[in-house]
Amino acid sequence: MMRRPSLRAIWPEGLDEAAAIKALEAHAEASEASPWPIQLLVGGGAWLSALLLMVFALMILDGQEGAQLLGALAIAVGIGLRRRVEARRVFLTQLTLSLSLAGHALVIGPLNDTSLIAPLATIALGALSLLTFPDPVHRFLSTLLMALGAVWLVHDLIEAPWALELLGVLIAAGLTATFEWEVAWQRSRAAALHLPIGFGLAAALALLSLPSIQGQPGHDLMGGTAGLCLVLAVAAWRAAQEAGVTLRGRAVVLIAATLLPLLVAPQAPGVVAAALVIVIGLRRAHPALFYGAIGFGLVFLYGWYAQLELPLMQKAGALVGLGVGILALRLTLLRASEAQ
């Protein structure tokens, strides 16, 4: 939507022709973008168009194989169009995104969950989309799809709670490593993959920790919580080291990150996972990661509190002990910083 520029916008530096031309170009570029309500309506129209198109095609096709063939075609069309469309063209970008996601659902949905081919195909499809579809939202969902496919594979291959706990620890370690090498990753050719993969691993870690809220078996001291505490300790140590905390202060952080969750909440791996993402979000200054982890942390903390088979006074004492431990850690770090 083109707006009439003011004289001050055209000549901000007086009667300077070069500055006036530069200001006009900047104004024209800013005016090309539609207001966000218009973009929202255009994007919604693209999703509705893709939905109606897929429903029409499904009504024509008959059978599971036809649906999967349509899904593969939708993914191919979505990837091919998106690689040729500029990001500012809202309708086409949202249309390609909706087509690709609908295609993923049609391909994965009918897969037989009793065969190992299904989770392997899910992981392979997520990896293909991650590398070929140039959209951060789609790459985030592709990373999440790969992680869920890995959970599916481990669950069917190794029918034991410790296997899923080990996978959660590996995802947490991968998340920590992703943001540990953020600078090197941003300078590489795969810079566009960094944040989608990092946020996807964080979301996968949160989803994998959800069963602990219902108190399902397998989430105990010798399982996921202990491994997550080790990963949290490494992340906290690196954050303290980068912040210039003394060796004594880093030792306190290491001990607290390892022992405090094990002593207070040994059956709450979700709380430890949320604390890990909070540390990463603070260290790398990612507000969405930080505030999202706080929200999930509150959910996990409430679930842990609700499933404690203790009298009300003992529950309150556990919360007080957790708060006192955090305050003691804060005072110790403040003294270490002042001594430095």
Image: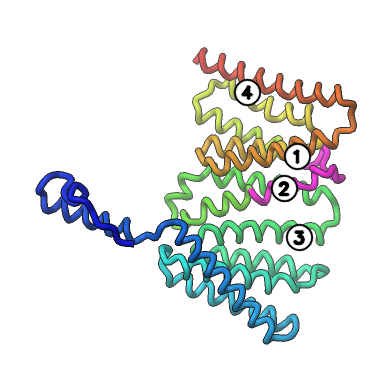
Nearer to us of marks 1 and 4 is 1
Nearer to us of marks 2 and 4 is 2
Q: Amino acid at mark 3?
A: Trp
Q: Real-space Cα distance between discs 3 and 1?
A: 20 Å
Q: Which residue is mark 4?
A: 251
Q: Real-space Cα distance between discs 1 and 4?
A: 23 Å
Magenta highlight range: 203-225
Q: Amino acid at mark 4?
A: Ala
Vertical side of 207 occupied by 58: above or below: below
Q: CB atoms at circles 1 and 2 under 8 Å apart?
A: yes
Residue 168's label in the rendered image is 2
Relative to 177, is 82 on the left or the right? left
Q: Along the line of sight, which residue is nearer the eye, 113 or 3? A: 3
Q: Which residue is mark 3?
A: 152
Q: Amino acid at mark 2?
A: Gly
Residue 279, quarter of picture = top right
Q: Residues within 10 Å of mark 2 (few under 14, many from 20)?
A: many
Relative to 243, is 301 on the left or the right? right
Residue at the spot 70% in from the left edge and 58% down from the top edge: 148
Q: Earlier in the sequence, mark 4 or mark 3?
A: 3
Q: Along the line of sight, which residue is nearer the eye, 267 or 223? A: 267
